Amino acid sequence: MQAFLDTLLGDAAGLERQLGYLAGMVVFGAVVVFGFVLPFAGIVTWAERRIWARIQSRVGPNRVGPFGFLQWLADGVKNILKEDIIPTVADRPLFRFAPYVVMVGFVGAFVCVPFSGDLIIADLNIGILYITAVTSLVVVGILMAGWSSNNRWSLLGGIRAATQIISYEIPASLAIFPAVLLSGTLSMQGIIGEQGAAPWQWHMFHSPFTLLGFGLFFTAALAEGNRTPFDLAEAESELVAGFATEYSGMRSTLFFMAEWGNLYVIGALVTTLYLGGWQVPQFTYNPVLMNLAQVGVFMGKSLACVFFMIWLRATLPRVRVDQLMAMCWKYMVPLAMLSVLGTATMMVALPNGSHTLRMATFAVVVGVVIRFAFKVRFHLKRARKLDYTSLSPGASQGLSS
Amino acid sequence: MSAVTSWLQNVTTSCSTVFEGLSITFSHFFRKPYTVEYPDRMETRVQDTLPFRYRGMLEVDLEICTGCLACERACPIECIVIDTTKDKATRQLIINRFDIDLAKCMYCGLCSEPCPTGSIHHTREFEGSDYSLESMMRRYVKFPVAAYKPKKTAEDDPEIMPVLERGMRYLDEYAQPEAKPASGTTSSSDTADPGSGPGGAA
């Protein structure tokens, strides 16, 4: 970003130059937030409903616009026009403030999302630490919402969210370590720069320990994002809507926008840390083309992660509270420790890494994917050949009247 | 030691079961949805897929109504009102009124059973919602008409023939569901199997 601004600013110096940097970042930040983050949070609701529907043999929203694509706009307009109700017994200032805290925690993460080699709002040298810190603001907002609603469901939801997010911060942070160790930096661009374009050059395939770290980070990030199977904070069947029970209209929309937008943050983090980020082979020296290709690759990887999360949500049931805590403290924290220590040991033992080990890890993952394809084929073959929808003219009986 | 093995077993079990579940849900992407998008996005109208003797809204073919009042007597809730007079000069039965109150009708089918010609019958229409009760009253006779008089020989009026054929077929289907139609009724669209004949012949 700075290099790009330098070419624009020319020979301006001193305060003017600093102001130029600031203006560039603010403009790009605004473009990212209003042009990408907010529409993305909306579109992903539509995508999620369509994908769930197909998994459940339904059609999903398909009436508003082509394939129902404009459904998210219709829902948004509806939510904006709805009455904003504040319960009389609620703690008014906190109640009104909570959605903004959640929103700030979520949008703040985009400061460090590296869309391409140059397109990043600010490449902080503590980037990944900043993101873990700022996304923790979400839990404050959720707890505020749960407490100020003065409602038992909301309070339970808020407390559940707090315990869950605070617990899962630990395996999530520990699982970030292997990638940071391998890169030797906390900066997002630095972490990506240490990886290559080919899949086996990603941090994920460095050794079995980083593969483990990838899985743990993904799971812990899901739990931090309050996604099924860890959506205890707003378990519909138990807590109405959890911390968002008393919210209506735009305020509840802000919560849900943060929740769905968080999917992208999780996807971007996983992509950056373990999946090679925006790395593409150097096929041209044209910076615009390079940046476009990098944005495309980064988007493709992170959207694949988002798809995977939606797919997981349609597959897995919600875990119980005790299972959630057992999984965090008994399983994920020790495994994350193992991942960190293993990676560190590997780095000491093999300072330059082992190409054989990389390829072996990569082969294992490819094998799992192939096994998965066969599994899917098996289930498709076993599926009953029943079609209740065959309402063809041939199925009709006799004459019409 | 058993604690460690059970710990490891829990890890492998959770991983393999999640793997299995994901493969099942993913296979659904390659299957067709079961949803039927009634009513506006269907290949065929639902009405056309229903069986011939489906008990939808009642209808009367006045051309072949004999004015015998069998349906009026059969109706358990008296939603059919028929008024007939005998024309002294021509010795013909005149139907002055034939009303069916569809708001009352309970679709039992008792009226279509005794009908000698299959004049009163259920259609396959079922979307009968309306804004007023009055509009549910179907008045089939606008001006008094002569009742149909069955002929000794086969019907030869080209206007009445198809209607009567249809009515007789309706009665046959009731007597012997799924049976082949009588050889006398040779509708152009009738194939060997009445169950698979295409709709829309009438």
Image (cartoon, coloured by chain):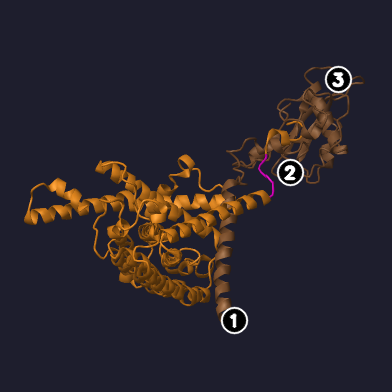
Chain colours: A orange, B brown
> Which residue type carries mark 2?
Cys
Which numbered dot is residue B2?
1
Instruction: Locate residue A284 relative to residue B178 in the image: left or right.
Output: left
Labels 1 and 2 within one chain: yes
Labels 1 and 3 within one chain: yes
Residue in view at x 82 percent, y 42 percent = B110
Query: Residue B30 magenta-drawn?
Result: no
Mark toward the start of the polypeptide (1 vs 3) = 1
How far apart are the alpha carbons under marks 1 and 2?
73 Å
Q: Mark 2 lies on which chain?
A: B
Which of A309/A393 is in front? A309
Q: Residues within 10 Å of mark 2 (few under 14, many from 20)?
A: some
| Numbered disc 2: secondary structure | loop
Residue in view at x 73 percent, y 43 percent = B105
Asked if disc 1 and disc 2 are in contact, CB closer than 8 Å, the reply is no
> Which residue type carries mark 1?
Ser
Mark toward the start of the polypeptide (1 vs 2) = 1
Which numbered dot is residue B105?
2
| Numbered disc 1: secondary structure | helix
Q: Residues within 10 Å of mark 1 (few under 14, many from 20)?
A: few
Q: What stretch is highlighted in magenta?
A: A384-390
Q: Which is the main secondary structure of the residues drawn in magenta?
A: loop
Which of A363/A21 is in front? A363
Which of A40/A159 is in front? A40
Residue carrying label 3: B155
